[in-house]
Amino acid sequence: MNSKLQNITILGATGSIGTSTLNVLRLHLDKYKIYAVSGKSQITKLFDICKEFNPIFAVVLDITSQEKLQNLITNYNAENNNSNEKITTKILFGNDALCQIAMDKNVDVVMAALVGAAGLQPTLAAAEVGKKILLANKEVLVMAGELFMQTVRKHKAILLPVDSEHNAIFQSLPKGFKCGFDDLENIDNNKIENGIKQILLTASGGPFLHKDIHDLQNVSVEQACNHPNWKMGKKVSIDSATMMNKCLEIIEAFWLFGINDLLKNDDSYEQILAKITNYIKVIIHPQSVVHSGVQYVDGSVIMQLSQPNMQVPISYCLSYPNRFASDIDFLDFFKYNNLQFIQPNTQKFPCIKLAYEALAIRNFAGNILNAANEISINYFINKQIKFTEIYTINSQVLNYYKQNANILNQQFTNNTSDDNLQNLESILNADKWARSKAEEFIQILN
Ligand code: NAD
Ligand code: MG
């Protein structure tokens, strides 16, 4: 193996981010070796990836998928006499195998591109051994922001945000800002006032930006997945349509950029709400050309622009702190003579507000909101609830937690002290509770 090559594991190689990552990596195979990949059920796609890159490991969901992929590879090798072209990839399955390829001692970089809660344990495992983590899987931070960032710091992992908005904020922050180590008031921990006023988080507004509020309840899954600017996986597309995606991204920004350090232990719910609402400002920008940024106290605004294509932020993470080509068209400024910036309509898209509420409730609130959202999205996909009921369920579960937080926290932590509030076990307990609570509320709804 070429010692100059960086070994990369791609968790979720068959997905939308995984595919874009491979598109960028194809241009830079002099710098990267695709060491391990994973996919859930798209076995043919995973087989094609194995054929092209011959990774050391490929991980699938279960034994049936393992057998299918193994058969495809065995047949391919049997038909192929050229030993240089044989696939030597070892096929593994299950959650432990995902953690194994995230932690493997030969791996330098982990692209965390699973979707939802499935990504929590492998991404956390990568942080526990101090890997360089390129994080697309925002749910990890929503579920376990405190634990994950503590783990990053403790094991000196390098954390680079892939999500386009967070990548843009990262690019707009003072040079050298390190996620997990610096906070916005106090970059480099050296008490120098850096003059950041607020984070500007842009949002396309999704496919229903201009739809009448009364027509929203009857939209279909297909309409919700039909994003005007981005081609993405199903879950994140629906999140964009409800604007729950922006809610998750506010929480993601809160943890990535050390905004939690602005809060004091005795801050009230209202004080936290006010601080975070001031610090993270959401701006609707339907063209998705300006990808977020930072406002400084002198009135300067630094934002990052590009075509709406995830290969740009992925490329930045892969080449950081340098830059290399991402294989997309450069921005044609004269095509965009009408860039718009609009105030979000939180009456029409109430999910945005749930982020501030969850952060102000603290403890397991983000985690609970994420779990409720995964359940309500599944019910919406299966046509068992209406589009607007995603918000209803999410807010009901969050509110129930708010009203009963003391007793539920004890239940999640098995009555241990507050110090242990955020360990993996308590996080998984809270996640499980919120999923069944969401189902309970859905039954009542029907
Ligand atoms: P996707 O659905 O296209 O891909 C998800 C990947 O995870 C696939 O490889 C799938 O096989 C795998 N997977 C899904 N469930 C699994 C499970 N239970 N166990 C093991 N593997 C599983 O999703 P995506 O659009 O690529 O998004 C990935 C993450 O990146 C999400 O958290 C999303 O919010 C975030 N993100 C995506 C985009 C985008 O443009 N697609 C942009 C910003 C952030
Ligand atoms: Mg985003």
Image (spheres, rainbow, N blue to C red):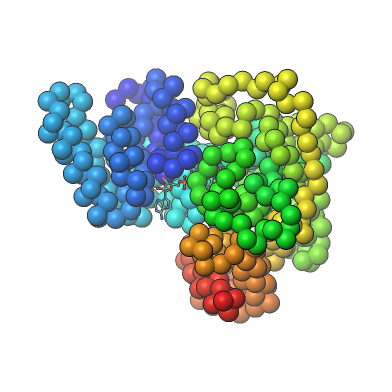
At x 51%, y 63%, the residue is 383
**Quarter holding residue 12:** top left
Residue 105 seen in the figure: no
Residue 220 seen in the figure: yes
Q: Is residue 68 left or right of residue 95?
A: left
Image location of residue 41, percent across then percent down:
34, 50
Q: Quadrant of the N terminus?
A: top left
Q: Is residue 51 above or below residue 182?
A: above
Image location of residue 363, percent across then percent down:
63, 65
At x 87%, y 33%, the residue is 298
Q: Nearer the viewer, residue 219 or 428?
A: 219
**Quarter holding residue 307:** top right
Q: Is residue 178 above or below residue 241?
A: above
Image location of residue 170, percent across then percent down:
65, 36
Image location of residue 84, percent across then percent down:
19, 23
Q: Nearer the viewer, residue 261 or 22?
A: 22
Q: Quadrant of the C terminus?
A: bottom right
Query: Which residue ends up furthest to the right in the rendered image?
Result: 298
**Quarter holding residue 395:** bottom right
At x 29%, y 55%, the residue is 62
Number of numbered labels in the structure image: 0
Q: Nearer the viewer, residue 361 or 79?
A: 79
At x 65%, y 28%, the residue is 306
Q: Is residue 189 left or right of residue 180?
A: right
